[in-house]
Amino acid sequence: MNKSWYKLIEGHLPINQGDIIDGCPVVIPPSEFLNLELSLGDRFQAKVEEYNVIVISHSCDLEHKKLKIVQVCPVYPLTEVRKNPKFIEGKDVEDLRRGNRPGYHLLDQCIIPDYTCDYLVVEFCNTFGVSFDFLSDYVKDKNRIRLLSPYREHLSQAFARFFMRVALPSDIPKFS
């Protein structure tokens, strides 16, 4: 029997790790921002982009309101990711499924009445910080899906492996 990886969550319920939030606005400061001499209260123009994201911050920190900023990662349908030349070959997709692509994590399809999605690819390379208060207000009227345990912990472990990797200045050469 194929156990579901997800549960449908009503918008008014608190945000948890593993919540998938569609169309989350992310503020992108302009590149010239670094050259501006701004004071507190000054205004500037920024770009706002929307991403489907998954919450990476731990549920216990969110529940006890220990965070002002919630860490999220973008998620993309596998069909969209496969258009990327790096993932065209079947072996690469199989590497993704097996957890051998450190910057990415594959989630199962979601088949819940009124909320169905393709396999999802979580991208760890581009995490965002979103205001906890803003995100709570943003989702309060929107149902969302939540990644369930142990799949949520598996995602967290994959993120930790990506985050803690170390690049060595020289590697041990391949054995012949």
Image: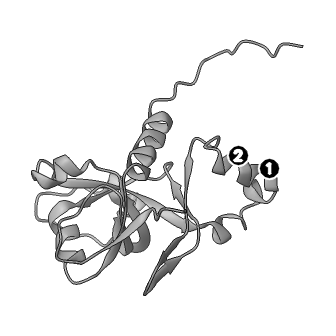
Disc 1 is placed on an element classified as helix
Looking at the image, which residue sits at the far front?
1
* Residue linked to disc 1: 91
Protein image colouring: one colour
Q: Is residue 141 left or right of residue 97?
A: left
State the quadrant of the N terminus. Answer: bottom right
Task: Locate residue 116, reporting x and y percent.
Answer: 50, 80
Badge 2 density bin: few <14, some 14–19, many ≥20, Cα 10 Å:
some
Tally the marks.
2
Q: Residues within 10 Å of mark 1 (few under 14, many from 20)?
A: few
* Vertical relation: 36 (above or below) 83: above
Per the image, label 2 sits on a secondary structure element best described as helix
- For the C terminus, the image quarter is top right
> Is 163 located above or below residue 170 in the figure?
below
Amino acid at circle 2: Asp
Seen as rendered, the residue at the extreme right is 176
Kindly identify the residue that appears in the image at 73 percent across and 50 percent down: 94
Numbered circle sitting on residue 31: none
Residue that mark 2 sits on: 95
Give yes or no for contact between labels 2 and 1 (Cβ–Cβ under 8 Å). yes
Q: For the point 78% across and 13% down, which residue is it?
A: 173
Whether residue 47 appears in this view of the structure is no
Rendered residue at 23%/51% (across/down):
59
Spot occupied by residue 44 in the image (x, y as percentages of width and height): 26, 70
Observer-nearest residue: 22 or 59? 59
**Residue 33 at x, y = what percent?**
33, 58
Q: Is residue 36 left or right of residue 120?
A: left
At which x and y percent is residue 22? 39, 75
Residue that sits furthest to the bottom in the current view:
114
Spatial distance from mark 2 to mark 1, Cα to Cα? 6 Å
Report whether 147 appears left or right of 61.
right
